[in-house]
């Protein structure tokens, strides 16, 4: 599966293109976008049985955007710990 390469490319693209955003969007908006990528790939990793990688990405997303993505991240962490289907 190509998930690790796709994840790396998506994150690299967001980093590379950050400077193309207006200055007002390079802060919390950009961090929320990064957090969204991390949570999307965390879900895929969890479904593939890679729980540690999924939790790591979800915690990274929470650190990047606790206000805008915090509820999503905390819900994902809860469901992963409880072994629920995502």
Image (spheres, rainbow, N blue to C red):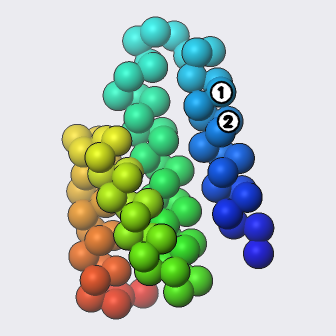
Q: Is residue 71 above or below residue 65?
A: below
Please determine whether, in this image, residue 45 is positioned above or below residue 60.
Answer: below
Residue 22 showing in the rendered view = yes
Is disc 2 surrounded by few (<14), some (14 to 19) or many (20+) residues within 10 Å? few
Residue on which disc 2 sits: 13
Q: Residue at x 53, y 86 (%)?
A: 49
Numbered mark located on residue 16 in the image: 1
User: At 38% across and 51% down in the image, what residue appears?
Assistant: 61
Q: SS class of the residue under badge 2?
A: helix
| x and y percentages locating residue 22 in the rendered image | 51, 10
20 on left or right of 26: right
Q: Are marks 1 and 2 in contact (CB under 8 Å)?
A: yes
- The residue most toward the top is 23
66 over 53 or under it: above or below: above
Task: Name the one closer to the observer, 47 or 51.
Answer: 51
Give the residue drawn at x 44%, y 80%. Answer: 51
**Where residue 13 appears, x then y in whole percent?**
67, 36
Q: For the view shown, which residue lies furthest in the bottom direction?
A: 83
From the viewer's side, name the closer residue of 85 and 17: 17
User: Within 10 Å of the Cα at label 1, are there few (<14), some (14-19), or many (20+) other Cα atoms?
Assistant: few
Please tell me whether residue 24 is drawn above or below residue 32 in the rendered image. Answer: above
| Label at residue 78 | none
């Amino acid at each position: 599966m190509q998930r690790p390469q796709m994840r790396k490319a998506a994150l690299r693209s967001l980093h590379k293109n950050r400077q193309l955003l207006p200055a007002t969007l390079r802060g919390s908006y950009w961090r929320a976008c990064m957090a969204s990528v991390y949570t999307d790939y965390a879900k895929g990793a969890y479904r593939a049985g890679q729980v540690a990688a999924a939790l790591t990405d979800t915690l990274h997303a929470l650190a990047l955007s606790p206000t805008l993505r915090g509820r999503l991240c905390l819900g994902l962490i809860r469901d992963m710990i409880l072994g629920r289907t995502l």
